[in-house]
Image (spheres, coloured by chain):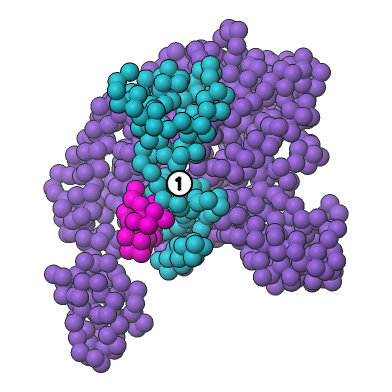
Amino acid sequence: MKVVVGQGSCGIASGARKTEDELVRKLAESGMGDVTVEKTGCVGNCYLEPIVDVYDGEKLAARYVRVSPDKAEQIVEGHIKGGKVVEELLISKTDEEFLSKQERIVLRNAGYINPESIDEYIAVGGYEGLRKAITSMTPDGVIEEMKVSGLRGRGGAGFPTWFKWNAAKNNRGDKKYMVCNADEGDPGAFMDRSVLEGDPHSLLEGMAIGGYAIGASEGVIYVRAEYPLAIARLEIAIGQAREKGCLGKDIFGSGFDFDIRIKAGAGAFVCGEETALIASLEGERGMPRLKPPFPAEKGFWQKPTNINNVETFANVPWIITSGGEAFAAMGTDKSKGTKVFALAGKIKKGGLVEVPMGLPLKDVIFGIGDGIKNDKEFKAVQMGGPSGGCIPAALSDTPVDYENITKTGAIVGSGGMIVMDEDTCMVDMARYFLDFTRKESCGKCNYCRLGTKRMLEILERITQGKGEDGDIELLEELAVKIKDGSMCGLGQTAPNPVLTTIRYFRNEYEDHIYNKKCTAHYCKSLITFTITDKCTGCTLCSRKCPVDAIKGDRKQKHEIDQDKCIRCGRCEEACNFSAILRD
Amino acid sequence: MCDNCGAAVSRSDFKELEPVLKKYAGIEGSLISILQKAQDIYGYLSLETINYISARMGITPAKIYGVATFYTQFRLEPIGEYLIMLCQGTACHVNGAALIEEAITDHLGIADGETTEDNKFTLNNVACLGCCSLAPVMMVKGPEGEETFGNLTKESVVKALDGIRARG
């Protein structure tokens, strides 16, 4: 028997390490010290962490969820010692569907194998793709297989992977580089983190296959410093792969040399752009430059360089082993395969969801994510982060693929899906993203540097109730000019969150500007708190009010002095009788 | 070299930094890695540290300053014993990160980028920690390592910070 505790960042944040310690202790106490306790990555049901799997031999006997340390004893005594499944901690049928409705290629191993053990990766067929590629295929054969698969870059732009590889292969150079962009900077996306933490070898294998195809002998992983666990597991994985001869000189006796090193990023969203990433790898400020020359021609240290994202690479070993056609059989005409989405925000069941491309949005949000938290009304879903846009509920039949999502004004991007409900103010969302891009603009292009600042100022004014006639039109004009006047993807897409919210939620902008109302009741300057007849005169709110704005005698209805009120909402939180009205 | 730099270098011997500089000597493009290690050792990049790296590695202080100020990871001011990294990612924003920030500010009396008077806590808003399903989230980095707190409420964040303070 074997006990496995899910330990991605989410699991650990939910207390998985304490649960693991407690399981080990309880097992020892019960004289079951020979039962091993192992770790695995994130299976994706983040909302159920900590998750504990009990294996009988190789078979998963039970999956327990929300296992806080105090529940370790129940599992040890009941299941492991007593041989009886602990029903009350078991994952429910509907929660199981969260996984069974998915199609997992990228996440095939995450949450099942121990990410710190190369033997477990090899046991599930790991490094077979690399073996096949370098011992029985030509570089052109590998690229052809990628072309058949139809895999497109999962980092955001959706550029065909084979095309980039082919360009890098055809450019001559005494040295070439295979670079992985693991600088997952889009706020609200965490699929790459999950692969890095849960299945690091699949990335290494994918990079090595790509390296073979383009003729590179060195790989570099540019990973966010904010992902310390991912870096630690990558380091372990690289060490193990070298020991086993899966990296290094003369891999599998094929004569192919390939090694990988890690470079920690230092926090700059713009470094997701290829040329900025290269500048950062070289120790410089991460500023993009004009293309051409493309990195495939002149990249890292002026050598031919190919850059792909983590998820793209994680698909590669599967494609080589199972064949490009099997991959192309999934998805839509132009968007093949599966895509991992990070489902978060006002969603009941948040986590990682991998589905074939082309599934309607609502199937992901309601079918898998089980709809909106607290049964509120679904308003919109934000896709593509700061470069993407908000898709309104009315368009929830939209198939999720590159073409259809782009038509809505958003982008598939790296796969962040932030769900919003009736309490989310769309003008504030636009303000939020502009605040982000304004801070992250590298400053090279005037339109991006100054334009995002001006747009942010207008949005701030609107949310503060100081919006003026003409603001919406000014935002639209600035948006177009910033898109046209910026050199790299950051500036070219920065106005998207504003444009999509204006397109679908213009009435909310107008309410803010002309009626001085925030219909989501979010923007502080535009809401008022009043006390209704439900008030019992308990005086609690008046004691909680930090500015002494609430007056009233005991057992009498209280009143709020609107001139004094700072709209902090503490009275609303304190009231036990729902007598405070937010409008 | 100006007088200032000379004086600054002589003030500390930078013993801990020496192995790092030796390791990266001659490896082109290592500046970011060097600055990361230096910040790990000293907690921040002081003018003295920048000048020392400059003198030893033959990189101008202006260039080092340029790189250090470009990336959000680098700090030019000292921080407290515990660094609170409050996530401002989209999922956290939608789930009320602003309220959590308010609660921290009320409780500790510090705003984003500031340090408490007793040097215990520094508050930093960060872009995204990637634990979006547990939003709102904060990571606290201290002598014991990193600890992540999820599903924060105004009450639980105060409790977590008091718990850390009680460790002594």
Q: Position of residue A510 (x, y in %)?
A: 21, 53
Residue at 25 percent of width and 74 percent of height: A545
| Label 1, residues with CA under 10 Å away: few <14, some 14-19, many ≥20 | many
Decide if residue A296 is on the left or right side of residue A91: left
Q: Position of residue A277 (x, y in %)?
A: 47, 26
The chain letter for the residue carrying disc 1 is B
The hue of chain B in the figure is cyan
Can you tell which quarter of the image residue A141 is in?
Answer: top right
Q: Position of residue B160 (x, y in %)?
A: 48, 63
Residue at 62 percent of width and 50 percent of height: A8
The local secondary structure at tag 1 comes to: loop
Residue with the mark numbered 1: B128
Image height check: is B137 above or below A474?
A: below
| Residues rendered magenta in the picture | B97-123
Single out the residue that lies furthest toward the bottom.
A555
Decide if residue A29 is on the left or right side of residue B68: right
Q: Amino acid at mark 1?
A: Cys
In the rendered view of the protein, which quadrant contains the C terminus of chain A? bottom left
Image height check: is A77 above or below A400?
A: below
Please say whether residue A117 is one of the residues in the magenta stretch: no
Front in this rendered view, residue A482 or B55: B55
Residue at 49 percent of width and 12 percent of height: A302
Please say whether residue B104 is one of the residues in the magenta stretch: yes
Residue at 41 percent of width and 26 percent of height: B52
Chain appearing in purple on the rendered image: A
Can you tell which quarter of the image residue A529 is in?
Answer: bottom left
Front in this rendered view, residue A81 or A524: A81
